[in-house]
Amino acid sequence: MYESNLVSVICIAYNHEKWIEKALESVFLQDHSSKELIIVDNGSSDQTSEIIRTWVKRHSEDLEVSAYYKSAAVPYCELFNEMLNLAKGEFVVDFSGDDFFYPHHLSASVERLSQV
């Protein structure tokens, strides 16, 4: 069962230590307040998982966030589908750990998709 207007952002990261913090911050700073963030480190061999852990500790009181850490890489579609089963949102975004959102991305997307 999904929650109306809630956006579930699923962020899968693999060796994204250079970009993951900027990516997560861009989700946190969205002007659409009804959002959850599901983060997965997919068996990274760099510092991605540590950066995620630190970020989650700083932001978990201000944002609904769940983090998962895989010890070995899982095929992307398999992992995304696993996380999709955990998502509670009416809307779902597949968001890579080396990407970022402009501040109004989610609100503009929800507004447009609600018109369809």
Image (cartoon, rainbow, N blue to C red):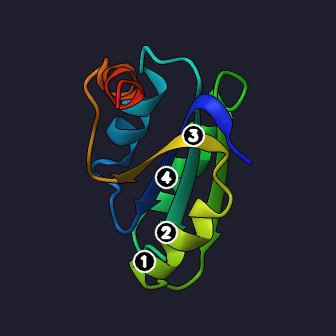
| Disc 4 and disc 2 in contact, CB within 8 angstroms | yes
- Mark 3 and mark 2: span between their CA atoms? 16 Å
Which class describes the residues within 10 Å of circle 4: few (<14), some (14-19), or many (20+)?
many
Q: What element carries label 2?
A: helix
Name the N-terminal-most of marks 4 and 3: 4
Q: Which amino acid does label 3 sit on?
A: Glu
- Quadrant where the C terminus sits is top left
Q: Earlier in the sequence, mark 1 or mark 4?
A: 4
Visible in this render: residue 75?
A: yes
Which mark's residue is nearer the viewer, 3 or 1?
3
Residue at the spot of label 2: 80
Answer with the quarter of the image where residue 14 lies: bottom left
Question: Pointer 1: residues within 10 angstroms few (<14), some, or many (20+)?
Answer: few
Residue, disc 1: 77
Q: Which residue is drawn at 59% across and 23% down?
A: 34
Q: Distance between the residues labelled 4 and 3?
A: 13 Å
Q: Give the labeled residue for mark 4.
A: 10
Is tag 3's residue or tag 2's residue first in the polypeptide sequence? 2
- Eyeballing the image, is 82 above or below 25? below
Where is residue 76 drawn, in percent x and y? Answer: 41, 77
Residue type at the position of mark 4: Ile
Measured in 3D between alpha carbons, the distance from the residue under mark 3 to the one under mark 1, in whole angstroms, is: 20 Å
- The residue that disc 3 covers is 90
For this view, does 78 lie left or right of residue 112?
right
Q: Looking at the image, is mark 4 or mark 2 earlier in the sequence?
A: 4
Q: What is the C-alpha distance between the residues marked 4 and 2? A: 8 Å
Q: Looking at the image, is 21 positioned above or below residue 51?
A: above
